[in-house]
Amino acid sequence: EAFSRAPIFARVAGYVKSWHADIGASVKAGQLLAAIETPELDQQLHQARAELANVRASAELSAATAKRWTELLATGTVTRQVAEEKQGDYAAKRSQVTALQANVERFETLKRFSRVVAPFDGVVTARSTDVGALVNGGSTPGNELFVISDTKKLRVYVSVPQAHAAAIGQGAKATLKVPERPGRRYEATVQSLAQAINAASGSMLVQLAADNVGGELLPGGYVGVSFPLPAAAGTLTIPPSALLFDKAGLRVATVDAQGKVVLKAVTVARDTGALIEIATGLAAEDRVID
């Protein structure tokens, strides 16, 4: 998977006026991907600005009135209650101005979302819109306009069998190979481990990170992962052809000191293909029949 992947949705409703990046295009953070026409939002913004201008004018008149009545109160011409009512009216008008100013700023912020931009440097891996398409604000799955992926670094997920989980730690190295580039090998590093065994598969999920500056590895693809796990000291190995498997289980035929065949039950630690590492059941001095 791409190290960073972001589906890009429209934040405002409208019509796609233009788009500027197709699939496979490299984009920079903040680069314009598409422009959206927002006729409804434009009218809402125009109305909000008109309401703000009206309330501001009313607040200025209220301020002048409150000032005059305060001056008259000092001369004793009017009552204190009437002067305080004028001051309260002015305070209410100021609150209305603040509320409508916030409403205008909200619409202006939404208007800026009519420019759909890339959130980070990456590659456009999907484009699902075209000029004239009607878009709605929201993040409903399937309605994304673009998908941006940072493919310079990839995450690789592999399920490691429980028998080998303890041998792999954070920072361990691994080798990757992909079917579309036979003969090529790529290095990866273990970044994190699930630290739990999946009961259904009997394996532990391991996440690796692989550099992909050249772009040879494709996100979403399948890879073969090889971990260089050295055999533990004193590990016994036998060829695969020496194993017997029947209703009695996994066994190995050996020859005892009297020259007679003895079948011994064994457990396998690891199968490397060319050799079988035996965990239990055999001793170093045993003579094994191949």
Image: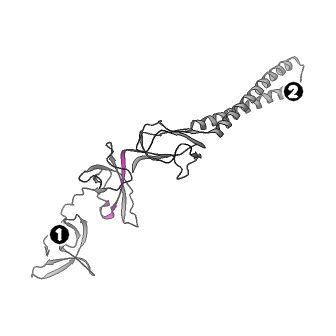
At label 2, the amino acid type is Val
Task: Quote the CA–CA distance across marks 1 and 2.
Answer: 105 Å
The residue segment tinted magenta is 147-173
Closest to the observer: 32 or 259? 32
Q: Is residue 189 magenta?
A: no
* Residue linked to disc 2: 82
163 over 23 or under it: above or below: below
Residue 127 is situated, as x and y percent measured from the top left of the image, at 47, 46
Residue 199 is situated, as x and y percent measured from the top left of the image, at 40, 66
Residue in view at x 19 percent, y 80 percent: 263
Residue most extreme to the left: 258
78 over 23 or under it: above or below: above
Q: Secondary structure at mark 1?
A: loop
Q: Are marks 1 and 2 in contact (CB under 8 Å)?
A: no
Closest to the observer: 201 or 214? 214
Residue in view at x 25 percent, y 66 percent: 269
Q: Residues within 10 Å of mark 1 (few under 14, many from 20)?
A: some
Q: Earlier in the sequence, mark 1 or mark 2?
A: 2
At label 1, the amino acid type is Pro
* Left or right of 220 in this view: 48: right
* Left or right of 38 in this view: 260: left
